[in-house]
Amino acid sequence: GELKHDDLVNICELGQGNGGIVWKYCTFTNIDDHWCNWCQWFWNSLSPKKGIYLEVKPAVKNQIVRELKVLDRCNSPYIVGFYGTFAAEGQINICMEYMDGGSLDLILKKVMRIPEHILGKITVAVLRGLSYLREHHRIMHRDIKPSNILVNRQGEIKLCDFGVSAQLIDSTLQTFIGTRSYMSPERLEGAHYGIMSDIWSLGLSLVEMALGRYPIPPPSIEDIDRLFDVDPYGNQSRPEGYGCYKVLAIFELMEWIVNEAPPSLPQKHFSPEFCDLIDRCLKKSTTERADLNTLLHHPFYKRYATESDNPDVSLWIEQVYQKDQSLTNDNKNSQYGRS
Ligand SMILES: O=C(NOCCO)c1ccn2cncc2c1Nc1ccc(C2CC2)cc1F
Ligand SMILES: [Mg+2]
């Protein structure tokens, strides 16, 4: 039945999530299996997975909570489930589906790179998720990047942290500067931007996951060859080539994205279709860049759009877990990785 607040009396803090504290609610009853199972069920499905700390007036907070209620009508296999939101102690708490495979940036830390056939499934899920948000809610995502693409052990791939509340977007604009590095040239230049900006972010995210590192400034072909000489599931750390490349400061990075040629994938290690899709996502000019419908008819998309369930993704996630138990521990503390 309806959960009442006084059913949940003692809150035990379990650890830091990104952007806030993640806690587990416990009911005030005798400790027994039923209680533990219930609590486990609550933790896995209904407990707040994210708290966004906001120093804003209560009226603004209430508006954000109101706008987030739209998520009640957001139902798609490619969008992370939403169970409710509430304001408490200066933060907006968002209860959403628990994705036990974590986010793709966390996974990328555990494996050298993500194989092309898995990236194909990720591409299908992201394009279908973007399509759903546009067709049913007339919104773009605004923050496509590996940490906002979540997976579970069933092999499902879903989007989260998209811009459904305009007020929340306004209230958090300056705080997430780090995300700018996935922003399209037109958005970095302050020009008008829309869904085509999400397409750029998808392209950049796919190159990062294919190579195993953020692709700006682009690695040399020797760096990439060395990457492919190493077994992705081995225990070696990334080849030294990845250590010596210059990490640009955020503003240098933004200038590079606006002024230099976009990254691309070498046909030596990736299929021509994948390379072509990337090139069409990373056109700096929005008039040349592929739009959502074009990509939904692209050969690379069609190659992976067939099966509905993803047994290969599920198997691959298990491999990632087996390779590195520490992924499981990371997951308990910060399921959503970097904000
Ligand atoms: O969380 C966010 N950025 O992450 C930065 C902080 O780690 C943001 C940002 C702007 N937003 C504007 N409206 C919502 C959000 C939003 N959060 C959010 C959006 C959708 C869901 C769906 C249920 C899956 C969950 C969410 F938590
Ligand atoms: Mg996020």
Image: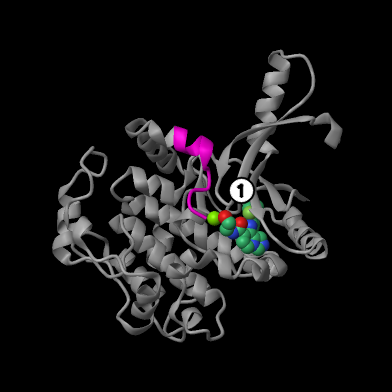
Depth check, front residue: 137 or 273:
137
Residue nearest the observer in this picture, 181 or 80 = 181
**The residue stretch that appears in magenta:** 329-339
User: Quick check: 78 above or below 165?
Assistant: above
Q: Quadrant of residue 35?
A: top right
Q: Quadrant of the N terminus?
A: top right
Instruction: Return the x and y of residue 77 as percentages of the image width and height.
Output: 60, 50
Q: Ligand 1 sits in which quadrant?
A: bottom right
Find residue 281 and report its image quarter: bottom left
Q: At label 1, which amino acid type do we have?
A: Gly
Residue ID for mark 1: 20
The picture places residue 156, in percent across and down from the top left corner, at: 52, 45
Tell me: 11 left or right of 216. right
Residue pictured at 47% horizontal, 79% vertical? 188
Q: Position of residue 205 (x, y in %)?
A: 41, 62
250 falls in the magenta region: no
Answer yes or no: is residue 161 visible. no
- Left or right: 35 as drawn, with respect to 141: right
Residue situated in front as seen by the camera: 310 or 72: 72
Which residue is at a point 24% across and 66% down the rendered structure image? 246
Observer-nearest residue: 335 or 323? 335
The type of colouring in the image is one colour
Which secondary structure, mark 1? strand
* Distance from mark 1 CB to nearest ligand 1 atom below 8 Å: yes
Percent across and percent down for residue 125 are 51, 56
Q: Is residue 335 magenta?
A: yes
Quarter assignment of residue 253: bottom left
Q: Is residue 247 visible?
A: yes
